[in-house]
Amino acid sequence: MIAPIKDIVQAERARNTSFNEASARTRLALLLDGGSLVEFIGPEAREVSPHLKTFDLPEQYDDGIIVGHGRLEGAPVFVAAQEGRFMGGAFGEVHGAKLTGLLHAARRIGSIPVLILFDTGGVRLQEANAGELAIAEIMRAMIEARAAGVKVIGLIGGRSGCYGGGGLIAGCCSALAVSEPGRIAVSGPEVIETNRGVEEFDSRDRALVWRTMGGKHRRLLGAADVFADDTVQDFREAALELLELLGPVGTFGLDRLKAEHERLAERLRRFGRCEDAVDIWTAEGVAHAATVPELPADQFIALANRIGRTSRDAR
Amino acid sequence: MTLDDILASLFPGGHEIRHDDGIIAGSATLRSGGKVLVIGIANRTALGVDEAIRLSGHLLDSIDKGSGPILVLVDSDSQRMSKRDELLGLNEFLAHLAKVLIHADMRGRPTIGLLYGHSAAGALLATGLATRVLVGLPGAEPAVMDLPSMAKVTKLSMAALEEKAKSTPVFAPGLSNLEQMGAVHMTWSDAVSLAEQLEALLGDMPAVQDRRGALGKERGGRLKAADIAERVRDLALQIR
């Protein structure tokens, strides 16, 4: 069968669009089958944060997140995409509640997977208590959905990375795809430096930030199952690949948690004394580990598929 | 109250709970005869990869050997902020601990958090906020972030933040603010036996579902969260 012209055009655009630089709306438009997105409580509803006014900060009509339904190669998916350019993609009351509601629906239906395009610095401090609690509610809703058989896939490659409580939510997903600029961590570089000093972590040393928190390290460590090049098309293909890889993986439960425990405990045993990511990669058997940050995506993917760990049956 | 005071008041019949290096783990017998599995973090200890794996390990070793509730005692710092913890994937370790607690609660081991000291950010998410019912004790001091750090990130002066903190519970640290949000279900009294208050709660445990959105709405702390979540859910269910 030959794909319709509009699909070919869409794929070409997706291939030429940097995931990292695109807006959340562009990412979704090009990631999903063309024109398939149906948004829930979109900007026209003007459900803004009730708290930003207190700080004389501008609001956004979608509160920095798009949630909805779409199709991926014809199959239904729920989607959520954070806009990292609005308040650093941070979780506030409304922003978080949209994702909670989506996960509740996914749990009820059971068979429709959820894709989350993370792009977040964590809790929105101007509404810190509501944001922190929203993250706790999302984690709960996600585990409930997964226990009901829902696959939840995180895609991480945005400008704000996936920090703070966003990192914990990512840790609750069934599987992750990450690109080189996608960073996953709890404490951000500046937060560590502010609290512990520049000797502990120099936030201006960008190479240090990338190799400690960036996508390549997370892939080699097994925190992410798939590494994507920084285009929307690569993330689309990564999402499809993960949905297929998760097929044979059973439903979330106690056995999976025990397997995850063993996976993480083994990581501490093997790498707990490593001082730098390069030491971990060397211990993993990567020859010339110091050159990993410079490897082009295709070479890195080949390396990661040979050496990198996986976690989808142990998370 | 100190941890020893709290344990003595909770379990007057004695207990088998150890704490070392800030990690609390063990079990105790209720006056009704039932067993409680206990974990926690004490002495304002930061929750890093080593602490998190010990706590989840204790839970996983015991979780399928009993049927009683799980009590999570919390007096922690924030997550441990270090290069080593992030290098090793702290987000996975904290998420793992939260997942074990949530899973246990869903599978018949009701979870109760008892916040008796400080806690913040990722440490609170992985412990107290991953339980079904979070109880505060007077004097508890939860915070997402302290005001000086918040001043740095938001670029607002401390004076401005302190002024706003008086009228705006949604961002300011403190037990009563988190209670208004629906995060903390109730505050116990330190003048009455904790054993009695624990047994009263266990006798009247809310059903296994997240009620925090509804509580936040009832208490006026989060007027939009519950409604937005419900509207999205209903719209999403119509898609079929």
Image (cartoon, coloured by chain):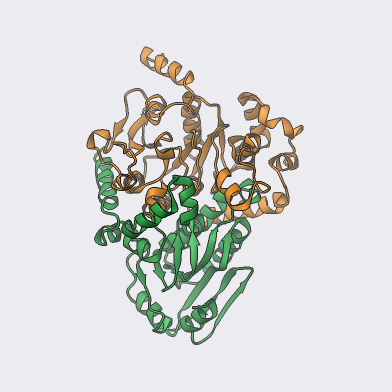
Chain colours: A orange, B green
The image shows residue A58, relative to residue A234, as above or below, that is: below
The image shows residue A285, relative to residue A302, as above or below, that is: below
Q: Is residue B211 visible?
A: no
Front-lying residue, B14 or A315: B14
Please indicate whether residue B87 sits to the left or right of residue A286 in the image. left
Please indicate whether residue B94 sits to the left or right of residue B223 in the image. right
Front-lying residue, B172 or B61: B172
Q: Residue at x 61, y 63 (%)?
A: B54
Residue A155 horizontal/vertical position (percent): 48, 36
Q: Is residue B202 visible?
A: yes
The image shows residue B120, relative to residue B112, as above or below, that is: above
Front-lying residue, B178 or B197: B178
Q: Residue at x 39, y 57 (%)?
A: B162
Picture quarter containing residue B22? bottom right
Picture quarter containing residue B177? bottom left
Residue A84 horizontal/vertical position (percent): 43, 35
